[in-house]
Amino acid sequence: MQNEKNKTALVFGGSRGIGAAAVERLAREGFAVAFTYVSRPDAAEALVEKLTAAGGTALAIQADSADPAAIRTAVEQAVAHFGGLDAVVVNAGILRMGPIESVSLEELDQMLAINVRGVFLAIQAAAVHLPEGGRIITIGSNTAVRTGHPGTSVYQFTKAAVAAMVKGIALDLAARDITVNNVQPGPIDTDMNAGAIEMLAGKSPMRRVGSPAEIAGLIAYLAGPEAGYMTGESITIDGGWVL
Ligand code: NDP
């Protein structure tokens, strides 16, 4: 399906996992896609090559979402390269686990910087460029609904902050016909869960974790023309984990 010809998207944190699946899916829908990465130029390069070989247009930008200037520059680079921006997916996020007694100030600040401040700044920088009908999609987590595991307090409240954030921003941008929605995955088969997939599958009502492609399908819907009347929402996609 190529229904988004001549549109462009920017995915923050697109080199691996859910972000990479979103990049691929949006490219399949016809978007020219820019994406950021921070630590894995090899993965970023491989993804650009894969998309280019499939006839798509992709641009990888190294930009740490903990760095406000890098976020701004990434948006400007994407806009300059493609001549505009129609959709932004803010996926970059980190998980550092540990009971409250062991959470260091550095870990706390890092999670807040990437999972909360970075999300707001990415939206703020991108919103300036989005046209009427533009799309903003964040990746939160079903832990915002039910924490589930001890040792995830900081991660959980950063994702709850994202769910709250999209509501206020959605209202700010509604008059411009720009939608802002938050996807809340449950356990997904990515590097973030390396070594824990079997344990997580065992705890899931469906006895499995989700695939990045399943999350990318929802992202593509939210980025597409049929989702224009949904805004400020957080949509949980977790195989019934929080029910
Ligand atoms: P991965 O750890 O598999 O991949 C993370 C991606 O984000 C990589 O592309 C990575 O780039 C990029 N990234 C990480 N930190 C930064 C940063 N500081 N600046 C820019 N890019 C960064 O994560 P997942 O795919 O599992 O998760 C993606 C999102 O989904 C996160 O927000 C996560 O919290 C959320 N989520 C994940 C769930 C899961 O079960 N996996 C469940 C619920 C939510 P690089 O390759 O360069 O390191």
Image (tube, rainbow, N blue to C red):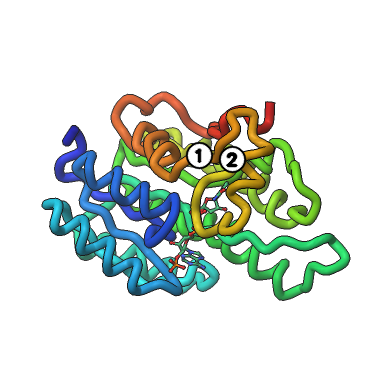
Under circle 2, the secondary element is loop
Whether residue 234 is visible to the viewer of this picture, yes or no, is no
Q: Is residue 59 left or right of residue 206?
A: left
Residue 60 in the image: above or below residue 209: below
Residue at 88% x, 66% y is 101
Callout 1: few (<14), some (14-19), or many (20+) C-alpha neighbours within 10 Å? many
Q: Is residue 87 left or right of residue 65?
A: left
Percent position of residue 243, x then y:
68, 26
Please identify the quadrant where the N terminus is shown.
Answer: top left
- Determine if the C-beta at disc 1 is less than 8 A from ligand 1: yes
Q: Residue at x 54, y 61 (%)?
A: 118
Look at discs 2 and 1 and give the one toward the viewer: 1
Q: CA distance from mark 2 to mark 1?
A: 7 Å
- Amino acid type at circle 1 is Gly
Query: Which image quarter: residue 53?
Result: bottom left
Q: Which residue is mark 2?
A: 186
Q: Is mark 2 within 8 Å of ligand 1?
A: yes
Task: Count neighbours of disc 2 (C-alpha within 10 A) and say few if under 14, some if 14 to 19, many if 20 or more.
Answer: many
Amino acid on which the number 2 mark rests in the picture: Gly
Q: Which comes before the other along the chain, label 2 or label 1? A: 2
Q: 168 or 154, which is in the foreground?
A: 154
**Mark 1 element type:** loop
| Vertical placement of residue 105 versus 49, above or below | below
Question: Which residue corresponds to mark 1?
Answer: 210
The residue sitting at 44% across, 39% down in the picture is 215
Residue ranking furthest to the right? 101
Image location (x, y in percent) of residue 88: 38, 49
Residue 113 coordinates in the image, percent (x, y): 61, 66
Name the spot of residue 163 as percent of width and height, x first.
61, 41
Compared across the picture, whether 89 is left or right of 85 comes to right
CB of mark 2 within 8 Å of CB of mark 1?
Answer: yes
